[in-house]
Amino acid sequence: MNKSKEESIADAWIRFAKRLLNLAERICQEIVLPPTIRPSDPKVAALLLVKRSISNGKSAILLHRRNLIIDARIIVRTSLENAFWIAGLTDHGKDFVKKMADHDLKYKKLLGERVLAYQSYRGSEPNISLQETIRVIGNEKRKAMTPKNVAEESALKHFYILYQLLSSDSAHPTTEALSRFLSPPEKKTGMRTLNATATLKPNEVSDTIWYLCLALLAICVGANQLWGGTKAGKHLSRLEKDYQTLYKKYVSGRS
């Protein structure tokens, strides 16, 4: 079966994404973590984000191969979020980790309060342990982290538009995302039917993996920088050049 031009372009991006995933794996394998490992260390947090991104990247490619493009786009959105967090760690170090911890405490308290409210609604005895946890967290005001504010405070702020695009057309149940599963009106009857699969726009098959490559490249660069350079990271300059070649060939200048 002959592939369309866009499918061939997507294959080229997938081959490149696999090279990036391989590099990410090598960075993780190369680094020996000390016995006193702490997730609060920006370098360790970055490495955990790399591992998460490897899993996300493999999932996105698998979904893409099965023609579940919208589902792949949802996973790619997560990969972009990982890239924003890596950039935050690179730019702000321990201060960014502190923001991550404050964010977690803010939502642990909020979730705990909602659980207690639900127990009260059901007439159940309140969870004493949960009440104590909320008390320990205290009433200190903590700022929530969002992909928007993290991205805009980093070198990747221009990537946020891609995150917004994937949120609107795939991840959230917007009218745009839902309408993908509705056929256009028939010319004679005006009837519309439900689609078995989502309707795709031009270039979405290939662009989905292009966005993944952007995220993975930024993640590898950030992690390599935080660890002061790795042996595997020496291949990044070659990959960056190859990315530019693919971009110029398949993206730049198209209508």
Image: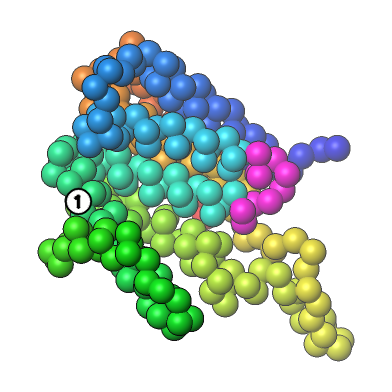
Taking the magenta stretch, the answer to whether it contains residue 69 is yes
Residue type of the residue flagged with mark 1: Lys
Query: In screen coordinates, is 148 left or right of 27?
Result: left
Q: Is residue 146 visible?
A: no
Quarter of the figure that contains the N terminus: top right
> As displayed, is residue 152 above or below residue 181?
above
Which residue is denoted by mark 1 in the rendering? 99
Which stretch did the figure color magenta?
A: 62-71
Question: At x 40% / y 70%, what residue is drawn?
Answer: 115
Quarter residue 209 falls in: top right
Question: At x 69% / y 63%, what residue is drawn?
Answer: 199
Q: Nearer the viewer, residue 71 or 192?
A: 71
> As displayed, is residue 134 above or below residue 57?
below
State the image coordinates of residue 11 (x, y, percent, origin top left).
Answer: 64, 34
Dot 1: element:
helix
Quarter residue 87 falls in: top left
> As displayed, is residue 48 above or below residue 111?
above
Query: In screen coordinates, is 72 left or right of 128?
Result: right
> As displayed, is residue 96 above or below residue 231?
below
Q: Is residue 255 visible?
A: yes
Q: Nearer the viewer, residue 188 or 14?
A: 14
State the image coordinates of residue 234 (x, y, percent, origin top left).
Answer: 33, 14
Q: Residues within 10 Å of mark 1 (few under 14, many from 20)?
A: some
Give the total number of marks visible in the rendering. Answer: 1
State the image coordinates of residue 162 (x, y, percent, origin top left).
Answer: 42, 55
